[in-house]
Amino acid sequence: NAGVMQNPRHLVRRRGQEARLRCSPMKGHSHVYWYRQLPEEGLKFMVYLQKENIIDESGMPKERFSAEFPKEGPSILRIQQVVRGDSAAYFCASSQAGTVGYGYTFGSGTRLTVV
Amino acid sequence: GQNIDQPTEMTATEGAIVQINCTYQTSGFNGLFWYQQHAGEAPTFLSYNVLDGLEEKGRFSSFLSRSKGYSYLLLKELQMKDSASYLCAVLYNFNKFYFGSGTKLNVKP
């Protein structure tokens, strides 16, 4: 009975490389949310997706960042040409059919370090 | 977003009571959540308030006043393991959480 699974747990990339972060929602959950957390800060909303649809991407930087949630497979957060400022923890959460009465279930996060 | 404000850091003594406040913008409000986050770990759900009043769950209680845009998390009989960040999150328009920056609680012996 796996929860929200994120991988990798830690990711190191050189400036200019691409980072791919994966999130598999809880079984039965069709809604996925990505958040970014800088050190000593709270979580900042990035994007909200359903299967094959982006519902709200108002928190996504306009360039270099993209997200998808295909019909099959995990949700992917992709960061192209990473810079040092992209270093952060990226958390994925999922919910069932958009209901959030008891909050999200978060994955353990991917800690991205850009060197 | 949505001006969710909470103190940056608090310190309390083991066995004591501590209250962590949170204020938020009221327009579009659909519920308020408190999460606990230990360093390097994912946030875990603590409590949920949608109506005014106090919700009690063991040593933790959470209060909400919708008209004032105000909530607090009350932790009783503090234990060392309660040292963590406490995040206030507000659900707006039924589809998105906004999080405060978190309150880092230091529990001292």
Image (cartoon, rainbow, N blue to C red):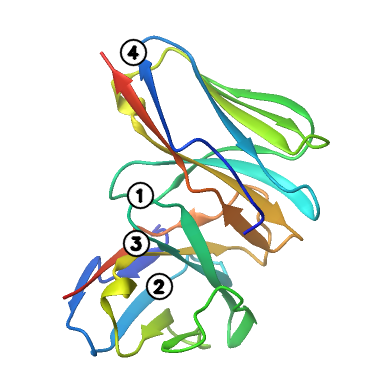
Q: Quadrant of the N terminus of chain A?
A: bottom left
User: What residue did someone put label 2 on?
Assistant: A23
Q: Mark 1 and mark 3: span between their CA atoms?
A: 15 Å
Give the percent coordinates (x, y) of residue A63: 46, 89
Chain of the residue under label 3: A
Amino acid found under the numbered disc labelled 2 = Cys
Whether labels 1 and 4 share one chain: no
* Closer to viewer: mark 2 or mark 4: 4
Q: Position of residue A97 (x, y in %)?
A: 67, 67
Above or below, B15 against B87 in this view is above
| Kind of residue at badge 3 | Gly
Give, as a three-letter code, the residue at label 1.
Answer: Glu
Q: Nearer the viewer, residue B23 or B86?
A: B23
Which numbered circle lies on residue B14? 4
> Is residue B49 at least partly visible in the picture?
yes
Q: Residue at x 72, y 57 (%)?
A: B92
Q: Earlier in the sequence, mark 2 or mark 3?
A: 2
Instruction: Give the quadrant of residue B95.
Output: bottom right
Mark 1, residue position = A40
User: Which residue is located at x 34 percent, y 77 percent?
Assistant: A21
- Quarter of the rendering containing residue B57: top right
Question: Which chain is disc 1 placed on?
Answer: A
* Residue that label 3 marks: A109
Chain label for disc 2: A
Proximity of marks 1 and 3: CB atoms separated by less than 8 Å: no
In the rendered image, residues at marks 2 and 3 fall on the same chain: yes
